[in-house]
Image (cartoon, rainbow, N blue to C red):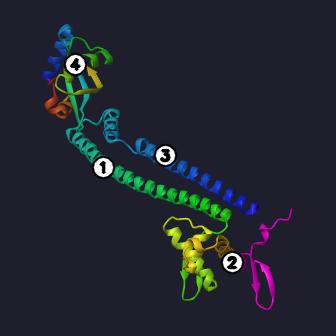
């Protein structure tokens, strides 16, 4: 399915671009707000400087009471400047929170990209088995959510293979035959084990293909169970 | 009236004595917390220009921890009661 893979790659590239844009936005926001905090908000001495200018520019402003009033004005300005400093702290804290949220969003974007990649992998490898349940009573094997009805002999073969896999072992045809039939290994035939494997493959493969690819619709006919956009005849 | 005439007479008769002192009205400040003051200081001799007066006054004020802001007026005559009241403790202090 080359078409499908291409689209996934494109989506992944878009995701990477989104991450880049996200980083750029976070950096721009932090730098911009820090600049505003540094330069735009008045400093603690701005009010004193303003009061001093008023004092210097007005020659008539010389009375004792007037000077005291000017001093009080400057002091209240300084108090307000302290308040502004605390506001600045609050703004900085909010900024940090916002940055954290943005980073979290970015992390989710990265996760999205990783998921894209995994979906692409899964699409390439066909079927990814995340669970295999063998039910001896029903003679059924469940692959992920799909159930396949098998004969007793096939279930037996599959069970033997599953046990060997859990022990990280490999089985030869002779071993399979001897384990299933109960006879000792020298009495068993390699071809008998191979035949069991072939039967298991045929039975399970046939059902899997009819479940995943060539579907049978009862009393109607057969249809390919895939998206028609992915079909390409060369 | 008699007093004023006497002053006028003295001013006319002794110009050198009248030029002995120059009264400089100035404004100064202290930082952190901001404190302002209006004061009058006497400069020896005839009244100089504002820049020279400021240069003379600045070290005298900074010795007491004040920073000169500007010179308001230079006058060879003694300031009036209003200015004297406004200057308060800073009248001829520095």
Q: Quadrant of the C terminus of chain A?
A: bottom right
Q: Residue at label 4?
A: B59
Nearer the camera: disc 1 or disc 4: 1
Could you say which is closer to the camera, residue A133 or residue A137? Answer: A137
| Chain letter of the residue beneath label 2 in the structure image | A
Q: Quadrant of residue A180?
A: bottom right
Q: Mark 3 and mark 4, same subunit?
A: no
Nearer the camera: disc 4 or disc 2: 2
Q: CA distance from mark 4 to mark 2?
A: 111 Å
Residue A181 appears at what percent x and percent y?
57, 80
Does dot 1 land on a helix, a strand or a loop?
helix
Q: Residue at x 50, y 50 (%)?
A: A26
Crowding around mark 1 (Cα neighbors within 10 Å: few <14, some 14 to 19, many 20+) is some
The residue lying furthest to the right in this view is: A234
User: Does residue A198 appear left or right of residue A86 in this picture?
Assistant: right
Q: Residue at x 19, y 16 (%)?
A: B8
Q: Mark 1 and mark 4, same subunit?
A: no
Q: Residue at label 3?
A: A32
Extent of the magenta region:
A206-234
Q: CA distance from mark 3 to mark 2?
A: 69 Å
Q: Quadrant of residue B93?
A: top left
Does dot 3 land on a helix, a strand or a loop?
helix
Q: Is residue B81 magenta?
A: no
Residue A118 appears at what percent x and percent y?
60, 61
Q: Residue at x 65, y 73 (%)?
A: A197
User: Does residue A102 appear left or right of residue A70 in this picture?
Assistant: right
| Chain letter of the residue beneath label 1 in the structure image | A
Q: Residue at label 1?
A: A80
Residue A52 appears at what percent x and percent y?
31, 36
The residue lying furthest to the front in this view is: A187
Q: CA distance from mark 1 to mark 4?
A: 33 Å
The residue lying furthest to the bottom in this view is: A219
């Amino acid at each position: 399915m080359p078409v499908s893979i291409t689209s996934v790659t494109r989506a992944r590239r878009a995701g990477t671009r989104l991450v880049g844009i996200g980083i750029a936005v976070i950096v721009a926001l932090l730098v911009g707000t820090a600049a505003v905090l540094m330069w735009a908000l008045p400093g603690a001495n701005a009010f004193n400087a303003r009061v001093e200018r008023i004092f210097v520019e007005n020659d008539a402003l010389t009375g004792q009471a007037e000077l005291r009033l000017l001093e009080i004005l400057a002091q209240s300005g300084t108090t307000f400047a302290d308040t502004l400093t605390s506001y600045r702290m609050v703004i900085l804290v909010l900024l940090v929170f916002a940055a954290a949220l943005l980073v979290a969003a970015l992390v989710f974007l990265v996760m999205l990209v990783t998921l894209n990649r995994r979906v692409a992998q899964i699409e390439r490898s066909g079927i990814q088995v995340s669970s295999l349940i063998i039910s001896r009573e029903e003679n059924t094997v469940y692959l992920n959510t799909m159930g396949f009805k098998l004969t007793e002999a096939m279930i037996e073969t599959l069970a033997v293979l599953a046990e060997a896999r859990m022990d990280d072992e490999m089985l030869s045809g002779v071993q399979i035959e001897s384990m299933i039939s109960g006879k000792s290994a020298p009495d068993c035939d390699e071809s008998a084990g191979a035949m069991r494997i072939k039967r298991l493959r045929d039975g399970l493969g046939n059902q899997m293909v009819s479940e995943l690819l060539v579907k049978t619709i009862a009393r109607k006919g057969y249809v390919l169970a895939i998206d028609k956009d992915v079909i390409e005849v060369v | 009236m008699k007093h004023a005439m006497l002053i006028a007479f003295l001013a006319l008769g002794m110009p050198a004595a009248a030029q002995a002192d120059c009264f400089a009205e100035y404004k100064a400040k202290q930082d952190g917390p901001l404190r302002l003051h209006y004061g009058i200081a006497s400069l020896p001799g005839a009244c100089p220009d504002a820049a020279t007066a400021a240069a003379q006054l600045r070290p005298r004020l900074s010795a007491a921890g004040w920073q000169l802001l500007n010179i308001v007026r230079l006058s060879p005559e003694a300031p009036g009661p209003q200015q004297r009241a406004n200057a308060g403790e800073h009248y001829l202090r520095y």
